[in-house]
Amino acid sequence: MACLKLKKFEEFLQTVEGFEKPKVYLEQYVTPSHIAAHALYTIETNYGDLENKLVLDLGCGPGMLSIGAALLGAQHVVGIEIDLDAIKVFQENVQGFELENVDCVQWDVLNLDGLYDILKFDTVLMNPPFGTKQNNGIDMNFLRIALKLAKQSVYSLHKTSTRDHIKKKAVEWNVKACVVAELKYNLPQTYKFQKRTSVDIAVDLWRFDVSKRNC
């Protein structure tokens, strides 16, 4: 299935079920199938960082990015997720696609520090919490950890408004970084405090080259 056309790929991802019980303190929002499809397709067609690769999905939620990576030919995908409700949906989604090379582990991404020396993945994917409400800075914490777990590259979605800050952090961490796609994240009304039924957020898909290759 690694030769999927983009349109067909997105159609597959549209069938991935989202959170049954989204939790605001975890900033749980499903990665839209349109965003996931275009991001993953760019990752594979432009850089070849999915097919036959060992892939890690940090904060995987119901598994949109994990399943997408597997459909594009990843050798094996491991999702890390703290929430048991999300893991249940993840497992049901994987079963629905009859994928045997996708697993999910319950773990707090922010407590993966002790595994840097024994866990290494070719490619790390993530759509981290944006760092709103009480989670200020969590997106950068996710990114710092991802960079230590990757052998080749990290791909991460961040608000376009944080672009300058991420550029500065990449320099500080001595890692090559570039924006490989600019996307519109249609955020649906998920929680009671949200006033509008949906809102469009400009997001960047970043590529961080851990191997020091040029983007």
Image: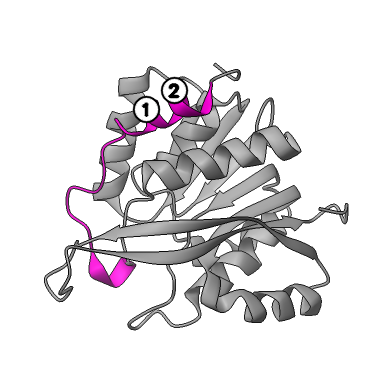
Could you say which is closer to the camera, residue 152 or residue 101? 152
Farthest right residue in view: 213
Q: Is residue 12 visible?
A: yes
Q: Give how far across and how far down residue 73 sits, in percent.
A: 60, 23
19 or 167, which lies in front?
A: 167
Residue tagged by mark 1? 11
- Does residue 29 appear left or right of residue 110 in this picture? left
Residue 39 picture location, percent across and down: 55, 45
Q: Which residue is mark 2?
A: 8
Q: Quadrant of residue 17?
A: top left
Is the N terminus in the top left, top right, bottom left or bottom right quadrant?
A: top right
Q: Quadrant of residue 14?
A: top left
> Who's the residue at 22% across and 58% down the image?
22
In this rendered view, identify the residue nearer to me: 126 or 12.
12
Q: Alpha carbon of mark 1 to alpha carbon of mark 2: how far?
A: 5 Å
Three-letter amino acid code at the position of disc 2: Lys
Which class describes the residues within 10 Å of circle 2: few (<14), some (14-19), or many (20+)? few
Assign a secondary structure to mark 1: helix
- Name the spot of residue 190 as percent of width and height, x first: 19, 61
Query: Label for residue 117?
Result: none
The quadrant where residue 10 appears: top left
Point 38% across, 50% down: residue: 31
The boundaries of the magenta stretch are 5-26
Give the SS element for disc 2.
helix
Looking at the picture, does residue 208 appear above or below residue 56? below
Q: Which residue is found at the position 65% from the left and 75% from the top?
A: 166
